[in-house]
Image: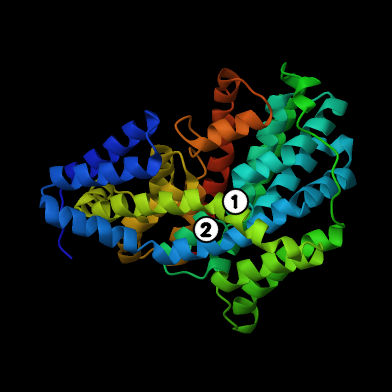
Amino acid sequence: MDAQFTTIGALAGLAVAIVLIIRKVQPAYSLILGALIGGLIGGGGLDVTVSTMVSGAGSMMSSILRILTSGILAGALIRTGSAEKIAETIVEKLGEKRAVAAIAIATMIICAVGVFIDISVITVAPIALAIGRRAGLSKSGILVAMIGGGKAGNIISPNPNTISVSESFSQDLTAVMMRNFVPALFALAVAILLASRLCTKGKDKISEADMESAGEKKLPAFGAAVLGPVVVIIMLALRPIAGIAIDPLIALPVGGFVSMAATGKIRNCVEYMEYGLSKVIGVSVLLIGTGTIAGIIKASALQADVTTLLEAMHMPAFVLAPLAGILMAAATASTTAGATVAGQTFAPALLSGGVSGLASAAMIHAGATVLDSLPHGSFFHATGGAVNLTIGDRMKLIPYEAVIGLTSTVVAVAMYLIIG
């Protein structure tokens, strides 16, 4: 399809959206307004612009449906105490001597089984603060451990970002998750190394005031806590193992109901479903706004111009994948929005350039974790608040987070160069 909008228009629309997000305008509205302005500047006219925006938002519907149903699993894991029990058990088993590794691994696993990364950090934080105080660790160090573990878990999870990027390239969700397993392990290792250094050198030690959020509660048995996630993993793994395709639309809510039943909380299913919905509705609305601007960018000359620029610089086509993930996630301060815009926009260019859909999805997804935690996004503030860090101290951690995300990105690119 010929470009309907100019590259200048697409970039102007994205710039408007970024400025509005930084100015604290609701991100979905920022993206919608940016798409409208970008389309008009790009020469599409009002009718064509609106039509393209609606089409772009519509293309997100399959992802949104899967994300909405994933809320059942997330709600069940959080409200039954299963997520907290999994984290607590991991930390207890590894012990205080390996506290940093335990905190990072616990957050990675919680995120990997389907809990959103910000909620994973908030869930693990009380446990991390308790063990960190006993071990004399700094708040900055344990937060880097949790964020790093969360980033590692996020690229191998059935979370909104993974669902979205797999949809963009028409790839099996399980395949996209497994492709980034090795990059996730490297990111985890780097997170532990960086966090260990910060934990001993950081001066922001944990005080009694920081411990107020940590309270005693009755948690389920570990076997019951992990049963729901295990069922999800088995169901999603049936496609590559046995050729039986069970869509995440089915697998994720089934895992949630199994978790409720195993923990004896099935009577509370309506309450937990409503809670889960409250956690995914925001990202679902965000994806509608993301779809509008992705539609404008996709229908612009940006793809062709970027491809031409890469060719003029004698750079291979695959470089576009990690670069797009990094830049779009930085622009939106969101892994999900960044991976979605990058995937929707550059999928045709990457595929026509000979880069496989699976490798493209993996590299974009990993790239989207490099600069996704900038201050104009909610993740920055939610994670800082989880350990009572000041804005200034939270800002100092951004380079560490970027290094962790860049590690997984470099490894994902290396894997493409080795295995294609």
Instruction: Give whichever of discs 1 and 2 has the lower sequence position.
Output: 1
Residue 234 screen position, x and y as percent? 69, 72
Can residue 402 be seen at all in this image of the molecule?
Answer: no
Looking at the rendered structure, the secondary structure element under dot 2 is: helix
Q: Is residue 109 above or below residue 19?
A: below
Drawn side of residue 206 relative to residue 171, left or right: right
Q: Nearer the viewer, residue 121 or 359?
A: 121
Q: Nearer the viewer, residue 158 or 270?
A: 270
Numbered label attached to residue 84: none
Drawn side of residue 332 relative to residue 17, left or right: right
For the point 73% across and 41% down, which residue is it?
124
Residue lying at the far top in this picture: please name it.
203
Residue 250 screen position, x and y as percent? 58, 73
For the residues labelled 1 and 2, the Cα–Cα distance comes to 8 Å
Quarter of the image that includes the N terminus: bottom left
For the point 52% across and 56% down, which residue is it?
160
Residue lying at the far bottom in this picture: please name it.
243
Q: Nearer the viewer, residue 319 or 381?
A: 381
Q: Which residue is mark 1?
A: 154
Circles 1, 2 touching at the beta carbon (< 8 Å): yes
Numbered label attached to residue 162: 2
